[in-house]
Image (tube, coloured by chain):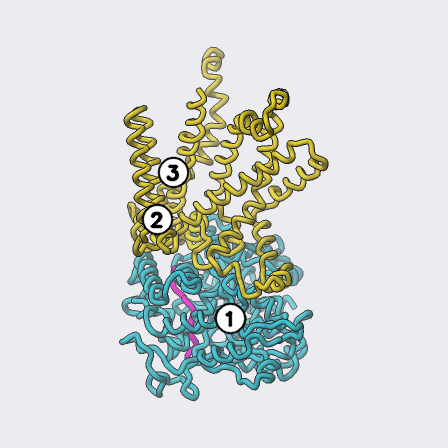
Amino acid sequence: MNEWLDRHMGRVFLAPAVTLILIFSIFPLIASLLLAFSRIRFRGGGFQMRWVGWRNFEKQFFGSEQFHLLGTFTTISLLGWAFGLACSAALIWWMFKYVRTHFTWVGFIGRLITFGMALGLSWLFAATLLSGNPFGTIGTTLFYVFIGCGVQFLIGTALAFACSQQLRGRTTFRVIFFVPMMITPIGVGYIFRMMADTTKGPFSGVWQWAGLGDFAWAADPWAARIFIVIADSWQWIPFVFIMMLAAFESVPRDLTEAAEIDGASPWQSFREITWPHVLPVAATVMLIRTIEAFKIVDLPNIMTAGGPGIATESVSLQAYYAWRSLDLGQASAVAYILLFVTVVICVSFFNLVVLGRVRKQQ
Amino acid sequence: MLRKLLGGSALALTAAMATVPTTAVADGHYDGVTINILTRPGPVIAGRMVERGEEFTAMTGAEVRVAEVPFAEIFQKLLTDWATGTNSIDVGVFASGWGVELVSGGLVANLDPFIEADDKINLQDIAPYFRDFNQKVEGSTYFITIDGDFQMMYYRTDVFEEAGLEPPRTWEEYLEVGAAIHGMDMNGDGEPDFGSCTFMKRNAQSYFAIQSIAAGMVQSKGTSEGLYFDPETMTPKINNDAWKKAFEVFKASVAFNPPDVLNHDIGDTRGLALAGRCGMVIDWGDIGPLSIEEGSQIKDKVGAIIMPGSTEVLDVETGSLVACDDTTCPHAVDGVNFAPFAAFGGWTGAISATLDDQKKQAAYDFLSYMNQAEQSNLDVTMGWTGYNPYRNSQLDDTAAWVDAGFSEASAANYLSAIKESLNHPNMASDFRIPGAQQYTGVVLDRELARYLAGEITVEQALENIEEGWEEITDDFGREDQAAIYSLSLGITN
């Protein structure tokens, strides 16, 4: 018995953790996958589940929910065609180059998925935004992800770099910068909604004074999206800040001092020593933020309830609204589409951008 | 007191179940019984229930616990709790229209035996619409009303007087009047105020307001005509000129609403109305009692009227609007067809079918206690409770309203508007079929929001709603839905 235990001790120790993961992570994943292919109705004594195949997914891409997820397609503008064709050509060239130089089957399949996703999204962008058509929740989510995370990364990194210098009062600033992250997103949503209320909010007087009394950010799709990005950034810049601050402070001081003695300018020192040193942390921060940003739900729900129209509705919010009306099949299908998009974009980013750079350095 | 309260209930219990001892009326009989209630958060609806629950506990020993969840999550929490057998909730307090789905699933207790012998509830005092329609499904009572809901229009008497205007009778007049008073300083703060304040936010209450506007254009033959479908085929009656005009009126009114009206829910509009910034307000019965509360700037300056109507109504055959005459609009007054919309229907209590007899009785006794005139006639006069009148005795006498702070004239005006709406033979009913929330709260609400935001045209919005409603009907089963819809229209005033 003791001998058996010695041999299997590793598995025994792992078993509780694996069981918990199976119960709390894997089982819900499988259950929700089943739901995505079903219609479910609750009634006395339980529920009725009806298998509907791909119908919930089909509805999102080709049916009555197409406008909601993807956007409205009418005609593609000249600019849209130009953009779409340029992106297609660039992607085909990228695939062609890969096949000609470093072909492996695993790499090829991975890149093929990335290629398909990038091609689909670029044509979606061309057919909606660049052609004057409203885009759906995927477009809105990507706006939150790319613009929001970009803004957060730039400001958070700049603040972290400033606080890593020997400036007076930097400890106080560190605490102040960190506070927004501790507030629940729902609280942030309500704070910003109240502050930005143009008719009875605390700044309504300022709003009137500035001559914006008749402008309502909540009634304008782009203004509403930008306000949500501002609120999201206010909350998440501290996360980027704290991570990047730790990275900047871990840069060996002797290296930067040696560069200074050798006559390197501050910019050269930053570009050649500091930035390469913090890059792995920066990539990780962006990856975490991107994954998190894809799931944005609280802020658009509280600040605008997805409006005006569906202009600020994210994919997660679309799934939530479907779930709330007990359309569990559709909610699951939308959630799986989001999962697929998130995984492909994040894995592609990590594999092609981060690991690509590591491979280059090696 | 306790004997008075529970006398009828004890009889019902004895007659209907014969399992409960006749000592049901003894003090502390419900010692150890806990009634778990689920409803919306905040002082509105839940707050008064907590207070009445404490009184009930003191009288009977039954503990009343009120759990509060966001409005949009009440129904699915209740449905999943009862359907999956979790049964952590004993009583759900929600819109009666949502309850049809619960009843069709066999999840709600039939209250007929309890009501039959309850001599305190006095059903005949409850307005016919709520008694015979809101509380019942297929002729049996499943719900107890604690709040009567339908929408009315409120206007500022002082502003209208100053402008020399009469309150609107039709939606065209509403647009004219709204534009005329927009920009006037209505609360003396030197700032221009708004012609009207309407909740137009998505995922809030805007889909109720649009139905109030459409009702007078779509329904003219009485409550049994219905607003939404052909009862035989369940073909939606939405893609037509009447709904189109309602959508256009709603959008046109944006011009004299606050600039950020597309992000305003009922909390925002009431805040503005009480601050004296709105010339007109579309709302439920709450504005009246709220107007007399501390801090209100519109005390005794608010008039209430039945929702404006239409001089043209839908010809179902052609989908176009035709002028009102004796045939097309049998209930019209001076050529105007009114159809006050029973938006939401009011908050009602339903009891889980799975409760044991004693708990079911205790739960019924509590709902009956809330509903009885002795309690409810006071509760409806207090704006913060969120309870609106539903008993004739609440409407016939102004004394309780004057005691609450109304002037005699305001009380009379407010109650007459309610009576006119409540007793109207063409009152329009809210959805009362399974999937009600999906039909209106999701599809209608979303397409209306997209139209208001300028994303789509009114024609596209109506086409999308028609397609969405057809999908929902097919999902729930067309024949089943048609049968329930027909039943839901079978009872009129």
For label 2, count other residues whose C-alpha is less than 10 Å away and answer few (under 14), some (14-19) or many (20+). Answer: many
Location of mark 3 (residue):
A30
Which residue sits furthest right?
Answer: A168
For label 1, count other residues whose C-alpha is less than 10 Å away and answer few (under 14), some (14-19) or many (20+). Answer: many
**Marks 3 and 2, Cα distance to the nearest angstrom?**
35 Å
On the image, the x and y values in percent for residue A274 come to: 57, 27
Location of mark 1 (residue):
B149
Q: Residue at x 49, y 28 (%)?
A: A17
On the image, the x and y values in percent for residue B261 come to: 52, 65
Specify the colour of chain A: yellow
Observer-nearest of B183 and B420 = B183
> For residue B303, which quarter of the picture?
bottom right
Q: Is residue B395 above or below residue A351?
A: below
Q: Which residues are magenta?
A: B425-436
In the picture, the disc for residue B417 is none
Observer-nearest of A106 and B466 = A106
Location of mark 2 (residue):
A126
Q: Any idea which chain is the cyan one in this picture?
A: B
Observer-nearest of B315 and B65 = B315
On the image, the x and y values in percent for residue A300 come to: 50, 52
Q: Is residue B227 above or below residue A22?
A: below
Amino acid type of the residue tagged 1 in the rendering:
Asp
- Between disc 3 and disc 2, the foreground one is 2
Amino acid type of the residue tagged 3 in the rendering:
Ile
Q: Secondary structure at mark 3?
A: helix
Q: Are marks 3 and 1 on the same chain?
A: no
Dominant SS type (magenta): loop
Q: Is residue B154 visible?
A: yes
Q: Secondary structure at mark 2?
A: helix
**Marks 3 and 1, Cα distance to the nearest angstrom?**
43 Å
